[in-house]
Image (cartoon, rainbow, N blue to C red):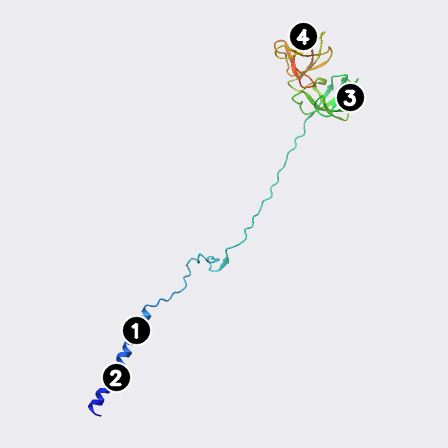
Amino acid sequence: MPIAAAAAILVVLVAIVGIAVVSSGGSSDDRSDTTITTPDDDAAPDADSNESYDEQGTTYDDEYDETTTTRATTTSETTTTPATRSATLFSGDAKVRSAPNLYASDVTRITGHENDPIDVIGEPTADGWYHVDYQGWDGYLFGAFVIPPAPGWCVGTSVGPTPYVTDATGGEITDEKSGNKVLMSATAPTNGRWPVVLPGGARGFVSDYDIELRSCG
């Protein structure tokens, strides 16, 4: 083979080998820059994900319905029944009314039965009326007609020619007919006067000389 032809073939071979070396080096560089990501079992779930992970790696929907359990509570209401006591009717003419005041309708009228037994239910009102049961008639009776009265009260009979009921300054409120039943809101007179309560609710004083005491509670 002529020398010139051999030299040309050698140049071509050298060029081919150089190209191969360059190509091999570039692929190696590309591989070194490539990052392969593998799943991390311990990684927290994506904040935008609708799933949560339990300790075993299983998933469940975190949008669940909350069920509220209400514990049944039993409230016991205690009803206190007013105490009933036996008393005696202190009047030969009294009215049992439908409410504790003079303007209430009559339930029954008791005439000629003074000293009859009567049942008193509970305590008197502030104005001295009792809830009573008289022979099956249920209603209210003024306290001047019941003996013995409740604690802190007294009953008596007005005496003298004209027993006046006066206010705190001595001014006359009304007069009590002699023989009327009187309800006192204390168990003793003060400065010679009994504090009294009238059936209509008015309050005043009567001289202790004009009251014949019958019973105190």
| Mark 2 or 4, nearer chain start | 2
Badge number at residue 45? none
- For label 3, the residue is 109
Q: CA distance from mark 1 to mark 4?
A: 136 Å
Seen from the viewer's position, the closer of residues 136 and 202 is 202
Extreme bottom residue here? 1
Seen from the viewer's position, the closer of residues 153 and 167 is 167
Quarter of the image containing the C terminus?
top right
**How many residues crowd around disc 4 within 10 Å: few (fewer than 14), some, or many (20 or more)?**
few
| Mark 3 or 4, nearer chain start | 3
Would you place residue 60 above or below residue 23 in this image? above
**Res 156 quadrant in image:** top right
Q: CA distance from mark 1 to mark 2?
A: 21 Å
| Residue located at (31% from left, 72% from top) | 28
Mark 1: amino acid: Gly
Count of labels in the image:
4
- For label 1, the residue is 26
Element class at badge 3: strand
Q: Position of residue 139 (x, y in %)?
A: 73, 25
Mark 4: amino acid: Tyr
Q: CA distance from mark 3 to mark 2?
A: 147 Å
- For label 4, the residue is 209
Q: Position of residue 39 (x, y in %)?
A: 41, 63
| Mark 3 or 2, nearer chain start | 2
Image-based side of 47 in relation to 139, left or right: left
**Res 20 quadrant in image:** bottom left
| Mark 1 or 4, nearer chain start | 1
- For label 2, the residue is 13
Quarter of the image containing the N terminus?
bottom left
Foreground disc of the pair 3, 2: 2
Mark 2: amino acid: Leu
